[in-house]
Image (tube, rainbow, N blue to C red):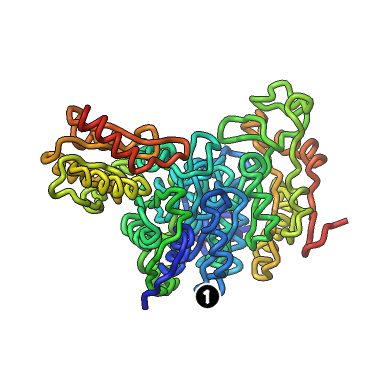
C-alpha cells in the first residue's frame, strides 16, 4: 500500500531509503541536511527492519563506513552537504575504483569553503566530473521535488547495484528543506544473506569452501593491468550514457526558446515560463534528471527547432559547459544564475532570457 | 640415527613438524627479509584456522607495507584508504555481527592519518579486533618519521634523530586507547623470538575470542622491526628494538577484560 505524507525532502529521502530495504546509513551532521540523520534516529529502523544507523565521527569516517558496508554487498548510504561532500571525495574515488554500489545524497549549499547554509547548485562540476582523484564518474540524479527525493532513493540503489557504481542524489538546500506531499512506496524487505551472496558474488561475506577469497581493492600496482581496469570502468560509463539518460521536457513542443535547468532552478523556470507565455514568448523547459549521464543527444535534437537556450543554474555557470558540448559553441546559449546561496526569482530568469537570448 | 631419509619420507604427514596454514596463499611475501610482518600474518591466519572461522573472517588491509596483505591472507578482505580501516570494520561488523572482523594496520595508518577513526571506533566500543604493527617508521614510502618514531631515532625525515622540540612527541596510542571505555582488551607484543611469537599468537586468539563477548574493541599491538627502514641487518634491528623500542613501548597486557592492568 502506498502512503501519502507531508514531508521535508531530507525526511523523504530517509524514509524512502528505509522502505527501499536499505541496510545501513552512516552520516555526520551538517546544515542543511541534518534532518536525514535526525529522522532516521527518530524512526529507529534498526528496531523495525534491522537497518543500521550510525552517526560517524566525521564525513570521512561515514563514507568509509559506506565503503566497508558496500564491500559486503549491503545497501548502504550516506548524506551530507557541500563541505562534507568534499571530505567524502577520497572515499568516493575508492568506492568508484573498487566498483562498489552505494548511495550518496548531497544537499548542496553555497560555497566555496564554508560558504553559506543557503541552497546552491555550485557542486555541479564536482558531482558530474568525478570529484575525487582518478578517471571515474558517479551516476548523478537531480531531484526537483520532495517526491523525487523519495523516488531517487530507490532508483539510486537500483542503479548503484545494476552498475556497481556510486550514485549521487544532487539535491539542494531548498529541495531538502521544503515540505511537500509525497507518495511513499510500501516497505521492501532487506536482502537476506543468501540473496546477497547470490546477487553479489563478489562481496566479502566470508570465504566459504566453494569459492576463492573475495578481495575488494582499488589498488593494482601493475600499470598494464590497471589500465585494463580503467578501460573497464570507461566502458561501464559509456554503457551508462547509452542506457540511463533521464530528462523531462515541459512546454517544449511549440517552444522557440528553452530554459535548461535542474532541481530548484527548474521549478523557478516553470514559473518564468508561465510569466513569459503570458507575454507571448514561447518558452519551454528541458530538465535533465540525470546530470551524469547528461542528456546531451536529446538536448541537441531539441536545439534544432529552437532559437536559443538559457542555462539557469544557482552557480557561476557550470552545467552550461555540458550544454555547449551538446549543442555546439556556435548555438545561442547563455548562462544566468545567482550565486552564494541566493535563489533567482522567476522575473529575474525571464528578464535574463529576454536580454541575453532574445535581445542578445 | 637414520642416515638416509628420503625427501618423500620427510614429506609424509606424520613426519612434518610444521605445516603452513591454508589461510596463507602461496604468493611470495612482498616484505623485506627479516621483517616481522610475515610472522604476524602467519599467526593471525593460524589463529583463524585453529578457531575454525575461515568462512567468517573478514579482514581490512591498510595503506602502508601491509597494503597488499590481501595477497597473502587467504580470506575475504577489503583494502581501506589510508587510516580508514576502523571505519570500514565498524560498518562490516555492525552489518554482519556474526562475522570475525579485524583490521591489520601499521603505525602511520593507525596512529597518524587514521587517529580519529582509531580513537572513535575504540571509544564507541565497536566489536572488532585491531592488529597494530608498530615499527616506528613509514616503511612503504621509504623510511620516513612515523607517529611512533621514538625520540632520537633516525629516519629519512628526521635524519639527525627525532628532536621532539622540532618534530613533536611520539604518540603512545596503545596506552591512549586503553583508557577508553570502549576497549576491552589491549595488549602489546613482539614476534622476534619464538617465545614472543607464542605470546603474541595467544593475545591475537584472545582478541578474536573476545568478539563473541560483544564488549568492545580488542587491540593487539606488535612492536616490530623494520630492518630496511632502520638501515640495519635483521639481527641488529631486533637487538636495537629490544634495547630502544621495548623501554619506550613495554611489552605485556595493558588492559584485560575491560580493566587496566596495574
Give the residue number, with chain letter if any, for mark 1: A48
For label 1, the SS is helix
Residue drawn at x 54%, y 52% as measured from the top left: A62
Give coordinates of residue A104: x percent, y percent: 44, 52
Task: Say which quadrant the N terminus of chain B sits in.
Answer: bottom right
Q: Quadrant of residue A27?
A: bottom right
Q: As drawn, is B230 to the left or to the right of A80?
A: right
Q: In which quarter of the image is residue B248?
A: top right
Give coordinates of residue A295: x percent, y percent: 23, 46
Residue that protrudes farthest toward the right in the picture: B262
The residue nearer to you, when weighing A138 against A215, is A138
Q: As drawn, is A53 to the left or to the right of A293?
A: right
How many numbered discs, if any?
Answer: 1
Q: As drawn, is B21 to the left or to the right of A133?
A: right
The residue nearer to you, when weighing B7 against A208, is A208
Give coordinates of residue B112: x percent, y percent: 65, 39
Give coordinates of residue A340: x percent, y percent: 47, 36
Amino acid at each position: 500500500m502506498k502512503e501519502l505524507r507531508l514531508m521535508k525532502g531530507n525526511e523523504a529521502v530517509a524514509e524512502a531509503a528505509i522502505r527501499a530495504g536499505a541496510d545501513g546509513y552512516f552520516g555526520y551532521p551538517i546544515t542543511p541536511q541534518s534532518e536525514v540523520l535526525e529522522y532516521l534516529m527518530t524512526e529507529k529502523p534498526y528496531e523495525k527492519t534491522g537497518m543500521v544507523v550510525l552517526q560517524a565521527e566525521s564525513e570521512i569516517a561515514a563514507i568509509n563506513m559506506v565503503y566497508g558496508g558496500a564491500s559486503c554487498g549491503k545497501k548502504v548510504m550516506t548524506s551530507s552537504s557541500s563541505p562534507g561532500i568534499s571530505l567524502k571525495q577520497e572515499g568516493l574515488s575508492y568506492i568508484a575504483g573498487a566498483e562498489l554500489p552505494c548511495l550518496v545524497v548531497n544537499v548542496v549549499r553555497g560555497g566555496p569553503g564554508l560558504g553559506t547554509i543557503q541552497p546552491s547548485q555550485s557542486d555541479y562540476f564536482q558531482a558530474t566530473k568525478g570529484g575525487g582523484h582518478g578517471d571515474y564518474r558517479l551516476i548523478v540524479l537531480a531531484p526537483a521535488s520532495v517526491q523525487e527525493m523519495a523516488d531517487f532513493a530507490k532508483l539510486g540503489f537500483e542503479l548503484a547495484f545494476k552498475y556497481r557504481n556510486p550514485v549521487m542524489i544532487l539535491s539542494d538546500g531548498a529541495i531538502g528543506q521544503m515540505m511537500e506531499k509525497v507518495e511513499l512506496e510500501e516497505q521492501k524487505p532487506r536482502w537476506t544473506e543468501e540473496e546477497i551472496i547470490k546477487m553479489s558474488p563478489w562481496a566479502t561475506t566470508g570465504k566459504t569452501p566453494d569459492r576463492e577469497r573475495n578481495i575488494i581493492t582499488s589498488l593494482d600496482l601493475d600499470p598494464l593491468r590497471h589500465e585494463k581496469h580503467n578501460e573497464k570502468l570507461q566502458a561501464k560509463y559509456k554503457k551508462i550514457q547509452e542506457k540511463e539518460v533521464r530528462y523531462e521536457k515541459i512546454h517544449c513542443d511549440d517552444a522557440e526558446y528553452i530554459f535548461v535547468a535542474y532541481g530548484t532552478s527548474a521549478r523557478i523556470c516553470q514559473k518564468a515560463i508561465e510569466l513569459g507565455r503570458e507575454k507571448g514568448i514561447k518558452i519551454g523547459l528541458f530538465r535533465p534528471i540525470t546530470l551524469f549521464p547528461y542528456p546531451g543527444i536529446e538536448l541537441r535534437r531539441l536545439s534544432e527547432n529552437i532559437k536559443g537556450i538559457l542555462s539557469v543554474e544557482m552557480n557561476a555557470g557550470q552545467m552550461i559547459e555540458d550544454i555547449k558540448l551538446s549543442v555546439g559553441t556556435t548555438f545561442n546559449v547563455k548562462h544566468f544564475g545567482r550565486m552564494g546561496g541566493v535563489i533567482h526569482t522567476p522575473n529575474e530568469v525571464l528578464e535574463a532570457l529576454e536580454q541575453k537570448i532574445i535581445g542578445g | 640415527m637414520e642416515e638416509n631419509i628420503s625427501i618423500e619420507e620427510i614429506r609424509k604427514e606424520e613426519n612434518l613438524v610444521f605445516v603452513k596454514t591454508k589461510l596463507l596463499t602461496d604468493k611470495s611475501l612482498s616484505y623485506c627479509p627479516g621483517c616481522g610482518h610475515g610472522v604476524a600474518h602467519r599467526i593471525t591466519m593460524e589463529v583463524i584456522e585453529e578457531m575454525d572461522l575461515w568462512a567468517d573472517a573478514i579482514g581490512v588491509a591498510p595503506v602502508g607495507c601491509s597494503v597488499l596483505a590481501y595477497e597473502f591472507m587467504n580470506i575475504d578482505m577489503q583494502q581501506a584508504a589510508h587510516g580508514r580501516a576502523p571505519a570500514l570494520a565498524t560498518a562490516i561488523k555492525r552489518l554482519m555481527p556474526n562475522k570475525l572482523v579485524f583490521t591489520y594496520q601499521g603505525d602511520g595508518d593507525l596512529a597518524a592519518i587514521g587517529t580519529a577513526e582509531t580513537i572513535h571506533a575504540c571509544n564507541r566500543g565497536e566489536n572488532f579486533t585491531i592488529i597494530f604493527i608498530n615499527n616506528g617508521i613509514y616503511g612503504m614510502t621509504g623510511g620516513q618519521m612515523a607517529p611512533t618514531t621514538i625520540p632520537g631515532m633516525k629516519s629519512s625525515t628526521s635524519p639527525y634523530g627525532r628532536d621532539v622540540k622540532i618534530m613533536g612527541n611520539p604518540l603512545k596510542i596503545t596506552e591512549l586507547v586503553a583508557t577508553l571505555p570502549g576497549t576491552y582488551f589491549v595488549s602489546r607484543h613482539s614476534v622476534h623470538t619464538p617465545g614472543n611469537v607464542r605470546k603474541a599468537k595467544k593475545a591475537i586468539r584472545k582478541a578474536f575470542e573476545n568478539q563473541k563477548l560483544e564488549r568492545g574493541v580488542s587491540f593487539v599491538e606488535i612492536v616490530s622491526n623494520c630492518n630496511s627502514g632502520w638501515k640495519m641487518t635483521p639481527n641488529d634491528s631486533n637487538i636495537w628494538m629490544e634495547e630502544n623500542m621495548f623501554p619506550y613501548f613495554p611489552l605485556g597486557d595493558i588492559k584485560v577484560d575491560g580493566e587496566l592492568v596495574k
